[in-house]
Every structure is written in C-alpha cells, then in structure tokens.
Image (cartoon, helix red, strand yellow):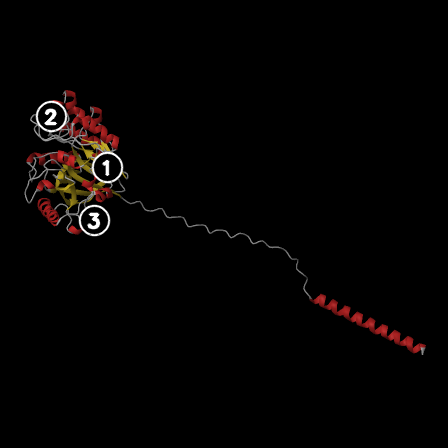
Amino acid sequence: MKKRLLFGILAALFLLLCFALTGCTQQQQQNAEAPPATPTTSIVPSPTEAPTPEPTPTPEPTPTVVTIGAIGDIMMMAVQINGAYLEETDTHDFSRSFLGVANEFRSVDLMCGNLETTLAGKDAGYSVKKRPDEPADTFNAPDVLIDNLKDIGFDFLSTGNNHALDRQMPGLLRTLDVLDEKGIYHTGTARSNEERDTPLIIDVKGVKIGFIAPTEIINKHDRYMNDEETEYAVTRLYSQQERLVLEVKALRAAGADFIVAYPHWDKEHKKAPNSRTRASTVLLLESGVDVILGSHPHVVQSIEYVTVERDGAPYTGLVVYSMGNFISNMSGKKEVDPLKYGLYVQLSVEKALDGTTTLKSAAYMPLLCFYRSIDGKYVHQVVPALLDTSLIRSYSELTEKELERTQTAREYVIEICTTEAIPVMQDADWVN
C-alpha cells in the first residue's frame, strides 16, 4: 500500500516536471523566433527649409514722360478783385473762379501761366481803371491769389509782361518776393543781374525743363527803372536779343533737357501773328527753344509747327502764338466775344533712355471765362468748352444761355487754331 502511494507521488512529480520543461522549451522557441526589440527613441523632425526664392527680375528701364499744362493771361481787374472780397473776414478768395478747371490743372506734372498783375501789397492800392498819367489800366492783386492758384496746381508763373511795373520797381520786387514765399517758380523779371543770369530749370521726375519769359512791351514804364535796373529788371524780347539768345544757350549748358519760351508779344486783339512775331519765333527756335507758348494779344491765335536750322540740322518746334485770356473782365460786348475765350494747352514730353528729350504729343482745350452776379458782386469763372456740355463743372451751374456760349467759344477757337498742328482734347481726357 505504501509502495503504491509512493509510486503515485513520484509519478505526479514526474508529470509536473515534464510539463514545466515543455513550457520552458516553447517560450525559448518563441523568444528565438521573435526579432530583437528595437530601442525606443524620440525622433525630432528637422525644420522644413524655405525654398530659395527666385531672383526678382530687374525691370527694363523705360523712357520718362512728363505732362505740362499751360494757359495764357491771368488778369486781375478791379471788378474781379471786388468779386472775390469777403466782407465778414476782410479777406479775398478767388477759388470760386477756378473750380471748373482745378482738377485738370492738378492732374499734370507741371502747370504754367502768365501772371499779368503785380503783388505789390494792399497799401500800394489794388487794380484800378486807367488813370490820366497811365497809358493803360494798372493791376495789383491780393497775395492770396497765389495761394488759390497754387491750390489748383500752378507751379510756374511768367512775370515778364507789360504790367510788370504797374506799381513801379517796389511792386516788381515784392511780386518776386511773394512768389518765392509761396513756392512758385518764376522768370521774366529779376532783382539783379545775378538773378537774371541764373537759368530757371525745373526738375520734373528727372526731366529738366528750362524756361524763359521775355517781353518787349512794358506800357512805357521805362521811367520807373534806373540805368542799372533797365539791364536786368525785365527780360526784353527785341532790345536785348543778344542777351536773350545767350540765356537760352545757358539753359542748355546748365542741363536743361527741354526749353519752353513764354513770350509776351504781338499786338492786342489781333487774330494772327505779325511778321515781327514770326521773326522772333525763328530766333528763339534757332537758339535752342523747343516749344513756344505765347500771350499778350488777349485773343487766341494760330498753332503751328515751325522748322528752322539748329546746330547744323533741321529742328521743328511747336508754336502756340497766343493762348488768349485765361481770366479777365475784358469784353467785346458781342455775341461772339474772343476776349472771353482762351486756350489750355497740354504737352507730353518724353526723355528717352539715351537722354534725348522730345515733344511726344500735344493737344488743346478751348476755355470760356464768364461772370455771374452772386450776392451783388460779379464772380468770374473759367470753364472748359467741352463738346458734351453736361460734363462742364463750375461753381455756378451754367444756364442754357451760358452753355450755348461755351459752344460758341469752342467753335471760334477751333476755327482759329484748327486741328492741323495739334488736336482738340477729347472730353474723356479732361479731368473733372
């Protein structure tokens, strides 16, 4: 019995041992079959590098184009000054006169006009009708006129005209001081020989525009200058011709790319330039002037291209003989009144890559100056004579009669100036 019991125990122990050995063998086989464990590591991704940008191509250089706007006589008669007077502030404001042209004038790179008045100060007395001791009306305007003109885009004003000495030498000198103070370029009169001999060149986007502004007519005011002042105070067109030619050449030598002459010439109220004016045209173009923009007749005259011999080769320059009145109280008291019609001329000047500068294109717009009674005073206003009268902008809404007058002005100006040399501006090109 004991032997059986002992045998059973031994058998059970044997079976347990075999089971244990079998389990160990299977585990070893599984371990042997499994691939070795890979150590776990934290992998930080490298930052993405920005792609190298393609080099920006350098733009090809292109010619430089600048626009120049020009008008004729800015006159300031007594009734105009009275119409701009504001009693409540004891000041003047001419801005209402220019609303119809302001945005167009501001749109060009360089805006020019002929300042046919002095700025001699209030104490010198503003414009008055012809006096017994004077051959014509004498003009003197409030300084604020220049603020108003600058606000609508004016950059250059010619001072060489027959009214330069209307308040004698003190008035001429103060006019130049005011223009300097207001930041307006000017030429045609001077304070000294040194100033007269300093070329006026205006840099517009890298294009250097030179100016001269001669006159011969000074309304017999020679008596207001001494001998020394006579040399420099007013640039004379005929009696100082040799000096004038040298001044044009000095502009070119000083670096002017393009030269504009603003002469005050010819006869008042004449529709066509006379022989002396035509001879002066040739002289100016031959000496180096590129474009001539004339004034003084108070009416528009023809526009044409004139060819001369210059530096051994033909040169053809644009000549606008007279741009007429820009603003004035002059009147012929007729249905067709050329004294109320003027020209706005727009030039496009191109400087090529080799530095050669030429007139690329030109066009003109007829203008009408009219006045309206506002609060018992006449306010003078300038408007473009657009083909579509509904587009005309002004301080006062134009009546049907006034709209008809703009078309009369347009027809008259086109008849005189024609479109053979340069075209009339399209309405769409006028900036309202």
- Which picture quadrant has residue 115? top left
What is the x, y in percent for residue 260? 18, 36
Residue 35 located left or right of residue 358? right
Q: Residues within 10 Å of mark 1 (few under 14, many from 20)?
A: some
Residue corresponding to mark 1: 150
Residue corresponding to mark 3: 429
Query: Quick check: 120 above or below 308?
Result: above
Residue corresponding to mark 2: 221
Q: Residues within 10 Å of mark 3 (few under 14, many from 20)?
A: few
**Looking at the image, which residue is at 24% across and 30% down?**
180
Marks 2 and 3, how far apart in space? 43 Å
Q: Where, quadrant-wise, is the N terminus in this rendering? A: bottom right
| Residue type, label 3 | Asp
Q: Upstream in the sequence, badge 1 or badge 2? A: 1
Secondary structure category for the residue under label 3: helix
Marks 1 and 3, how far apart in space? 22 Å
| Residue type, label 1 | Lys
| Residue type, label 2 | His
Secondary structure category for the residue under label 1: helix
Secondary structure category for the residue under label 2: loop
- Which picture quadrant has residue 208? top left
**Looking at the image, which residue is at 23% across and 30% down?**
178
User: Residue 77, can we see it?
Assistant: no
What is the x, y in percent for residue 417? 10, 44
Q: Residues within 10 Å of mark 2 (few under 14, many from 20)?
A: some
